Image (tube, rainbow, N blue to C red):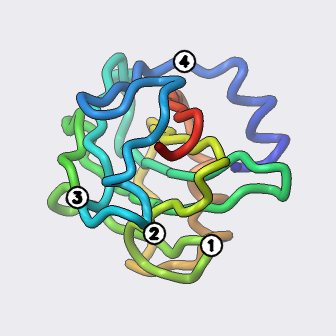
Protein backbone atom coordinates (compact mmCIF):
# COMPACT_ATOMS: atom_id res chain seq x y z
CA UNK A 1 0.00 0.00 0.00
CA UNK A 2 2.98 2.29 0.38
CA UNK A 3 3.64 2.32 -3.35
CA UNK A 4 5.67 0.38 -5.87
CA UNK A 5 8.95 2.08 -4.95
CA UNK A 6 8.47 1.19 -1.30
CA UNK A 7 7.56 -2.38 -2.30
CA UNK A 8 10.80 -2.76 -4.25
CA UNK A 9 12.84 -1.30 -1.40
CA UNK A 10 11.16 -3.57 1.15
CA UNK A 11 12.70 -6.58 -0.57
CA UNK A 12 16.08 -5.60 0.92
CA UNK A 13 14.71 -4.71 4.36
CA UNK A 14 14.87 -6.90 7.44
CA UNK A 15 11.76 -8.95 8.19
CA UNK A 16 9.67 -8.67 11.33
CA UNK A 17 7.62 -11.65 12.53
CA UNK A 18 3.93 -10.68 12.93
CA UNK A 19 1.32 -12.88 14.61
CA UNK A 20 -1.93 -12.72 16.55
CA UNK A 21 -3.54 -14.95 19.15
CA UNK A 22 -6.89 -14.46 17.34
CA UNK A 23 -5.97 -14.21 13.66
CA UNK A 24 -3.85 -16.70 11.71
CA UNK A 25 -1.96 -15.86 8.54
CA UNK A 26 -3.95 -17.09 5.55
CA UNK A 27 -7.14 -17.75 7.53
CA UNK A 28 -10.33 -15.65 7.48
CA UNK A 29 -10.50 -12.48 9.59
CA UNK A 30 -12.90 -13.21 12.46
CA UNK A 31 -16.15 -11.26 12.01
CA UNK A 32 -15.61 -9.65 15.45
CA UNK A 33 -12.93 -7.43 13.85
CA UNK A 34 -15.06 -6.51 10.82
CA UNK A 35 -17.91 -4.03 10.46
CA UNK A 36 -20.21 -6.87 11.63
CA UNK A 37 -18.46 -6.98 15.01
CA UNK A 38 -17.91 -4.52 17.81
CA UNK A 39 -14.47 -5.47 19.14
CA UNK A 40 -12.29 -3.12 17.07
CA UNK A 41 -8.80 -4.09 15.98
CA UNK A 42 -7.49 -7.61 16.54
CA UNK A 43 -4.57 -8.15 18.90
CA UNK A 44 -1.21 -8.17 17.12
CA UNK A 45 2.28 -9.21 18.20
CA UNK A 46 5.64 -8.73 16.53
CA UNK A 47 9.25 -9.74 17.09
CA UNK A 48 12.70 -9.43 15.51
CA UNK A 49 12.53 -5.63 15.36
CA UNK A 50 16.02 -4.22 14.61
CA UNK A 51 17.88 -2.64 17.54
CA UNK A 52 18.13 0.73 15.79
CA UNK A 53 14.33 1.07 15.52
CA UNK A 54 13.10 4.34 17.03
CA UNK A 55 9.37 3.87 16.44
CA UNK A 56 6.89 1.36 15.03
CA UNK A 57 3.87 1.82 12.76
CA UNK A 58 0.98 -0.51 11.94
CA UNK A 59 -1.07 -0.24 8.75
CA UNK A 60 -4.18 -2.33 8.08
CA UNK A 61 -5.36 -2.42 4.49
CA UNK A 62 -6.97 -4.54 1.82
CA UNK A 63 -5.04 -5.55 -1.26
CA UNK A 64 -8.00 -5.44 -3.60
CA UNK A 65 -7.90 -5.16 -7.33
CA UNK A 66 -9.20 -1.59 -7.08
CA UNK A 67 -6.09 -0.42 -5.24
CA UNK A 68 -7.10 -1.34 -1.75
CA UNK A 69 -8.42 0.56 1.21
CA UNK A 70 -6.51 1.58 4.34
CA UNK A 71 -8.54 0.65 7.41
CA UNK A 72 -6.13 1.76 10.13
CA UNK A 73 -2.85 3.60 10.62
CA UNK A 74 -1.10 3.79 13.99
CA UNK A 75 2.36 5.30 14.27
CA UNK A 76 4.99 6.59 16.70
CA UNK A 77 4.58 3.41 18.75
CA UNK A 78 7.36 3.04 21.32
CA UNK A 79 9.95 0.60 19.89
CA UNK A 80 9.96 -1.37 23.17
CA UNK A 81 6.31 -2.23 22.51
CA UNK A 82 5.85 -5.59 20.80
CA UNK A 83 2.09 -5.93 20.74
CA UNK A 84 -1.24 -4.17 20.31
CA UNK A 85 -4.06 -5.31 22.54
CA UNK A 86 -7.47 -6.08 21.11
CA UNK A 87 -9.48 -2.90 20.49
CA UNK A 88 -6.79 -0.52 21.73
CA UNK A 89 -3.84 1.70 20.88
CA UNK A 90 -0.61 1.80 22.92
CA UNK A 91 -0.03 4.81 25.18
CA UNK A 92 1.72 7.56 23.24
CA UNK A 93 0.90 6.13 19.80
CA UNK A 94 -0.87 8.30 17.22
CA UNK A 95 -3.64 7.32 14.80
CA UNK A 96 -3.88 8.79 11.31
CA UNK A 97 -6.79 8.99 8.90
CA UNK A 98 -8.03 5.98 6.95
CA UNK A 99 -9.21 5.90 3.33
CA UNK A 100 -12.71 6.78 4.55
CA UNK A 101 -11.34 9.82 6.40
CA UNK A 102 -12.00 8.33 9.84
CA UNK A 103 -9.36 8.57 12.56
CA UNK A 104 -8.92 5.19 14.25
CA UNK A 105 -9.74 1.61 13.30
CA UNK A 106 -12.24 1.50 10.44
CA UNK A 107 -13.43 -2.13 10.46
CA UNK A 108 -13.18 -3.95 7.13
CA UNK A 109 -16.51 -4.75 5.46
CA UNK A 110 -15.88 -6.50 2.14
CA UNK A 111 -16.04 -10.21 3.01
CA UNK A 112 -14.31 -11.16 -0.26
CA UNK A 113 -11.17 -9.07 0.31
CA UNK A 114 -7.89 -10.09 1.87
CA UNK A 115 -6.78 -7.84 4.72
CA UNK A 116 -3.17 -7.15 5.65
CA UNK A 117 -1.85 -6.14 9.06
CA UNK A 118 1.62 -4.76 8.37
CA UNK A 119 4.10 -3.73 11.05
CA UNK A 120 6.88 -1.32 10.09
CA UNK A 121 10.02 -0.64 12.12
CA UNK A 122 10.99 2.98 11.57
CA UNK A 123 14.22 4.95 11.87
CA UNK A 124 12.72 7.97 13.60
CA UNK A 125 9.29 9.10 14.69
CA UNK A 126 6.85 10.54 12.20
CA UNK A 127 5.96 13.39 14.56
CA UNK A 128 2.67 13.97 12.76
CA UNK A 129 -0.51 15.01 14.52
CA UNK A 130 -3.46 12.74 15.25
CA UNK A 131 -5.71 12.58 12.21
CA UNK A 132 -2.96 13.53 9.77
CA UNK A 133 -3.80 12.89 6.13
CA UNK A 134 -3.41 9.34 4.89
CA UNK A 135 -1.09 10.41 2.06
CA UNK A 136 1.28 12.27 4.37
CA UNK A 137 1.30 9.46 6.93
CA UNK A 138 2.00 6.69 4.39
CA UNK A 139 4.77 8.73 2.74
CA UNK A 140 6.34 9.30 6.16
CA UNK A 141 6.22 5.59 6.96
CA UNK A 142 7.72 4.67 3.58
CA UNK A 143 10.57 7.16 4.02
CA UNK A 144 11.59 5.81 7.45
CA UNK A 145 10.99 2.04 7.13
CA UNK A 146 13.97 -0.17 8.03
CA UNK A 147 12.09 -3.48 8.54
CA UNK A 148 8.60 -4.83 8.04
CA UNK A 149 6.39 -7.87 8.51
CA UNK A 150 2.85 -8.81 7.66
CA UNK A 151 -0.07 -11.03 8.65
CA UNK A 152 -2.62 -11.48 5.84
CA UNK A 153 -6.17 -12.81 6.16
CA UNK A 154 -7.91 -14.71 3.35
CA UNK A 155 -11.23 -12.86 3.69
CA UNK A 156 -13.78 -12.09 6.44
CA UNK A 157 -15.55 -15.08 8.00
Q: Is residue 58 above or below residue 138?
A: above
N-term-proximal mark, 3 vs 4: 4
Crowd tier of the residue under label 3, counting other residues whose Cα lies within 10 Å: few below 14, some 14–19, many 20 or above: few
Task: State whether residue 24 is above or below residue 130.
Answer: above
Q: Please, is residue 143 above or below residue 92 in the view?
A: above
Q: Secondary structure at mark 4?
A: strand
| CA distance separating discs 3 and 2 | 11 Å
Residue 6's image quarter? top right
Q: For the residues labelled 3 and 4, say whether their Cβ atoms are less than 8 Å apart.
A: no
**Residue visible at 83% across and 41% down in the picture:** 5
Q: Is residue 23 left or right of residue 102?
A: left
Label 2: state its secondary structure.
loop
Q: Label 3 belongs to which residue?
A: 87
Of residues 22 and 97, the one nearer the viewer is 22
In the rendered structure, the answer to whether residue 35 lies left or right of residue 64 reads left
Residue placed under numbered mark 4 in the picture:
14
- Check residue 99 in the rendering and tell me which mark sits there, or answer none: 1
Q: Are marks 1 and 2 in contact (CB under 8 Å)?
A: yes
Amino acid sequence: MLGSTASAERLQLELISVSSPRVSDGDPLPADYSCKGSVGNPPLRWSRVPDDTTSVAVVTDSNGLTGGEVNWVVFDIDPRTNELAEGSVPVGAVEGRTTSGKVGYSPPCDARENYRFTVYALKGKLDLKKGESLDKTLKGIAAKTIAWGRLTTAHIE
